[in-house]
Image (cartoon, rainbow, N blue to C red):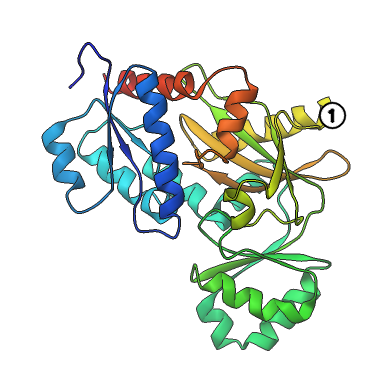
Amino acid sequence: MSDSSGLYVVVLAGGISHERDVSLRSGRRVADALIAAGHRVVLRDPDAGLLPFLVNERPDVVFPALHGSSGEDGSLLELLAAIGVPTVGSSGAASRRAWSKPIASSLLAAAGVDVPESIVLSHEAFRELGASSVLKVVRSALEGDLVVKPASGGSAQGVTIVEDTNDLPRAMVEAFTYDDVAVVERRIHGTEIAVAVVDTGDGPRTLPAVEIEPTTGVYSFQARYNAGETTFYAPSRLGDAAVTAVSEAAVLAHRTLGLRDLSRVDFIVDDSGRPWFLEANVIPGLTETSLVPLAIEASGTSAAAIYGALVEAAHARSN
């Protein structure tokens, strides 16, 4: 229950996904920011004791900082809703829509957002129809460089840029390591941009777009979480028209997928200034090298102010 020191907030971090370590770093940063905002914070791993703990403790708000399937596939979020715990972030249903890259891309394409051409392949179909036959069709249907990625997941795990056709089989194997479904899409060349969308009760608004420039040219897992491997520009160096276009596309994606409170939508902006949707993140990374904190800083506010406002909005929503 709440007291004079602020709201009682349980921050969830860790889990058993491939992104556990990143989640723990995000959770610590969120906890520190909420303490700075005057709230009382407990940091918890989503283990077998979590649900009984929440039922017994009845915190004012839960703030999930869980990455990967632990928090982003919608399962835990629906359980939190079922026990009546106010939670920062999107609903379970909205999280499922965003978690599946093929579903999110289909919904956004129908809404008018530009999405790269792609072919979605299940591991079962890949085996039964014969890898060589399948890949021959893929190569004839999608020209140029390709991106192969798992249909779900984050932090670029299992993602491969394919410039040589001979590398496609290995890329498929890598993607299937992380998911039973893989996406093969046409690579869009341009500037990688991340747009954070925040809604503390007055409707979704964007923070300054963050431009990503990896030293290797590829924004890999290592480039995301190892300091010095990527140069970030916050705000981005895009022209005004491109910034407007990518910001509008991010808000449209947030609304179309039914997201809530906080999201990060990733794009490639091509040389003509046209944004191409890559993915939407319902629980984006909040580590010291993550994009949302950079956007918050560029906006002239603080993580304590933003996360604190999200916690208060979630608490108000439950009353």
Lateral position of residue 222 relative to residue 33, left or right: right
Residue 46 seen in the current view: yes
Taking depth in this image into account, of 187 and 66 the one nearest to the observer is: 66
- Give the residue at mark 1: 239
Residue type at mark 1? Gly
The image shows residue 295, relative to residue 144, as above or below, that is above
Q: Quadrant of the C terminus?
A: top left
The image shows residue 124, relative to residue 18, as above or below, that is below
Lateral position of residue 211 relative to residue 19, left or right: right
Q: Position of residue 234 (x, y in %)?
A: 70, 30
Question: Image quarter for residue 272?
Answer: top right
Q: Which residue is pictured at 42% across the width and 19% down the height?
A: 309
Q: Which residue is pictured at 39% across the width and 46% down the height?
A: 24
Q: Position of residue 130 (x, y in %)?
A: 62, 88
Taking depth in this image into account, of 86 and 24 the one nearest to the observer is: 24
Q: Residue furthest left?
A: 56
Q: Residue furthest front?
A: 228
Q: Which residue is pictured at 60% across the width and 24% down the height?
A: 297
Q: Quadrant of the N terminus?
A: top left
Q: Which residue is pictured at 33% across the width and 51% down the height?
A: 75
* Label 1 element class: loop
Query: Neighbour class for label 1 at 10 Å: few (<14), some, many (≥20)?
Result: few
Q: Position of residue 186 (x, y in %)?
A: 76, 62
The image shows residue 19, relative to residue 184, as above or below, that is above
